[in-house]
Image: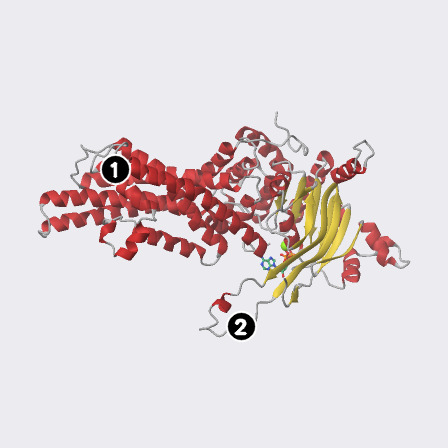
């Protein structure tokens, strides 16, 4: 069979399309628990009394796509699976089935290429607490291939834009307040100019002013630099301010997706959309209160 | 000029050596902050070296051995404790690679960086070796004035060659021990200390392996530390040259060439497993 690779051939258009899709998640499933039962090995001397450990189905057939340059929000209650999803995208957890592609690179088979494109802010700042903020940034910049010279130039700029007093960079991490640490965490990830940013509750624990600093910074970076952002949050207001598109996640499933306006319209039933509170939209579409913790679905076993 | 956030910028291409060095630099920064612990280990190392080497003096005073034999024993024990100080420092530094980052809470951010795992582990090993050399030399310098030992016959070049070649296989052992905390977040660190204890027993640190029961001696020959101790004692007490030590060096090189890739491979398998089962980290 002969194939043509002209400009309009399906192959090239598929490639072009892949270029456009920053993130493509297809039927992603993740289970926790279960595992190997050591007791079975010694069943001849120890009775196997314990029930087999429960398996939790934490991500259930999750599929979505994020276009290049888009800010995509993922909203869900505690325990709904947001961080688990972010970890799969960060190559820190392996999916049990389904696939995830970041700019066409598979997170499992091409983890190295994916890592070079992404960075992440997690809810807890996670630094070497006895090193200074600057030493931390130096290390985390260098392992992304930046030279000390580049880091020296970039750090003051990023910190200034986050409203972080530059003198504080010499302070030991554990002498900084939680909000200041979180700003250093944001600086750490933007320092490496990721094409895709995974922000897992980046503003949790910040005071209103710092929260605005960080939100403005995220918006600026996204607007000026064509970065794609996936943001998880509990904060509806934050989601509305920052996100082009939102998905609600509940019990490990994506229950609804769309622009904030479209989501409002889905529950409007004739009411003016501006009057509808986003929290109510969440409640109606997911059947959950955002404030309510979730327990993952347990399944007896999985193969 | 470096410009902040140019998303589709050409991929940065720091070579493996530069990336590995970032880990050495980080460990050095951490080490400076934890200098009080370094002091503790130094004092412990000196005291341990003295305490064990004084046993030789006791042997002489109690009339168990003559002055000449006792002096040989001083050197035998002194070298044993110093080599062990070195080996255990290397093993500690490398095998704590996961534990340390878990404790600091940085493990996810380090493991998701675009650094091949072998480069990461090489960086940690290089630091471990440099760190151990500094610490051991300090212990040596402080402990030496307590004993009248004669180094006139020592072949220092051969001793350095043994340490250089032997460190490869010790790094491999350290990486293997470092896999345990990856597999067992709760008790893995304790397990890696037990690995270290077993190496101490079987490698003839304070005695020749010949004094061990036969079945234990079998394990002695599987421990690279046995050949390192043999080599160092041969070079410093016996004055063996590099040429005379070719056999020992060859065995050590073989251990290194096999153990390092094997341990990196095992680490990669364990990392994959931890990522499949969610053992890396859970909070957040
Ligand atoms: N490594 C793990 N091992 C076992 N269970 C896990 C692990 N990580 C997460 N879980 C479970 O998976 C479920 C989803 O957790 P996840 O952290 O993804 O929730 P989340 O949406 O990020 O919640 P939060 O808003 O509190 O951060 C929870 O029930 C949690 O207990
Ligand atoms: Mg979370």
Looking at the image, in which quadrant does ligand 2 appear? Answer: bottom right
Q: Residue furthest top?
A: B1
Q: Which residue is mark 1?
A: B141
Could you say which is closer to the camera, residue B123 or residue A301?
Answer: A301
Position of residue B16 relative to residue A244, above or below, is above
Cα–Cα span, label 1 and label 2: 58 Å
Could you say which is closer to the camera, residue A194 or residue B33?
Answer: A194
Q: Quadrant of residue B86?
A: top left
Residue A242: x, y in percent? Answer: 74, 45
Discs 1 and 2 carry the same chain letter: no
For marks 1 and 2, give the one nearer the viewer.
Answer: 2
Chain bearing mark 1: B
User: What colouring style does the render use?
Assistant: secondary structure
Q: Which residue is mark 2?
A: A50
Q: Using a 10 Å C-alpha cutoff, classify the residue at mark 1 as few (fewer than 14 neighbours), some (14 to 19) or many (20 or more).
A: few
Position of residue A66 relative to residue B6, above or below, is below
Residue A14: x, y in percent? Answer: 78, 39
SS at circle 1: helix
Q: What is the tally of numbered marks visible in this picture?
A: 2
SS at circle 2: loop
Q: Using a 10 Å C-alpha cutoff, classify the residue at mark 2 as few (fewer than 14 neighbours), some (14 to 19) or many (20 or more).
A: few
Chain bearing mark 2: A
Left or right, A253 with reference to A190: right
């Amino acid at each position: 069979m002969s194939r043509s690779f002209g400009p309009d051939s399906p192959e090239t258009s598929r490639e072009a399309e892949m270029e456009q899709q920053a993130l493509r998640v297809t039927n992603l499933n993740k289970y926790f628990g279960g595992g190997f039962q050591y007791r079975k090995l010694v069943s001849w001397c120890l009775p196997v009394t314990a029930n087999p450990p429960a398996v939790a189905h934490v991500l259930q057939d999750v599929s979505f796509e994020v276009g290049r340059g888009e800010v995509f929000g993922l909203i869900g209650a505690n325990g709904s699976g947001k961080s688990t999803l972010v970890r799969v995208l960060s190559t820190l957890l392996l999916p049990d089935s389904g696939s995830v592609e970041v700019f066409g690179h598979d997170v499992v088979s091409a983890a190295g290429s994916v890592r070079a494109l992404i960075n992440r802010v997690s809810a807890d700042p996670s630094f070497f607490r006895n090193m200074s903020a600057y030493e931390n940034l130096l290390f985390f910049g260098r392992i992304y291939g930046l030279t000390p010279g580049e880091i020296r130039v970039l750090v003051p700029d990023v910190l200034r834009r986050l409203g972080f007093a530059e003198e504080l960079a010499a302070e030991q991490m554990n002498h900084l307040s939680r909000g200041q640490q979180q700003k250093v965490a944001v600086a750490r990830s933007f320092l490496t100019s990721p094409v895709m940013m995974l922000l897992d509750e980046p503003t949790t624990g910040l005071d209103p002013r710092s929260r605005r600093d960080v939100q403005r910074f995220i918006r600026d970076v996204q607007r000026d630099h064509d970065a794609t952002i996936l943001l998880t949050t509990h904060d509806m207001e934050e989601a509305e301010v920052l996100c082009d598109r939102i998905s609600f996640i509940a019990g490990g499933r994506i229950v609804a997706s769309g622009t904030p306006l479209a989501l409002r319209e889905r529950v409007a039933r004739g009411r003016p959309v501006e009057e509808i509170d986003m929290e109510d939209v969440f409640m109606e579409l997911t059947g959950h209160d955002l404030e309510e913790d979730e327990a993952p679905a347990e399944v007896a076993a999985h193969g | 000029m470096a410009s902040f956030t140019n998303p589709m910028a050409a991929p940065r291409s720091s070579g493996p050596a530069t990336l590995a060095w970032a880990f050495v630099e980080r460990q050095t920064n951490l080490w400076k902050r934890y200098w009080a612990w370094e002091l503790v280990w130094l004092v412990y190392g000196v005291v341990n070296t003295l305490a064990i080497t004084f046993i030789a003096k006791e042997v002489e005073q109690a009339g168990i051995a003559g002055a000449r034999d006792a002096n040989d024993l001083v050197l035998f024990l002194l070298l044993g404790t110093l080599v062990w100080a070195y080996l255990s420092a290397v093993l500690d530094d490398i095998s704590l690679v996961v534990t340390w980052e878990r404790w600091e809470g940085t493990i996810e951010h380090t493991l998701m960086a675009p650094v091949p795992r072998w480069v990461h582990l090489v960086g940690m090993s290089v630091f471990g070796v440099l760190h151990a050399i500094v610490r051991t030399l300090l212990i040596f310098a402080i402990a030496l004035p307590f004993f009248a030992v004669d180094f006139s016959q020592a072949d220092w070049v051969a001793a350095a060659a043994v340490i250089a070649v032997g460190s490869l296989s010790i790094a491999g052992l350290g990486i293997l021990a470092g896999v345990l905390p990856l597999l067992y977040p709760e008790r893995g660190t304790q397990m890696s200390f037990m690995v270290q204890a077993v190496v101490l027993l079987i490698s003839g640190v304070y005695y020749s392996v010949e004094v061990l029961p036969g079945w234990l001696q079998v394990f002695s020959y599987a421990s690279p530390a046995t050949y390192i101790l043999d080599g160092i004692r041969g070079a410093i007490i016996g004055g063996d040259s590099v040429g005379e030590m070719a056999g020992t060096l060859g065995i050590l090189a073989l251990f290194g060439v096999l153990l390092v890739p094997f341990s990196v491979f095992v680490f990669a398998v364990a990392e994959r497993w931890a990522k499949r089962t969610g053992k890396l980290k859970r909070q957040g």
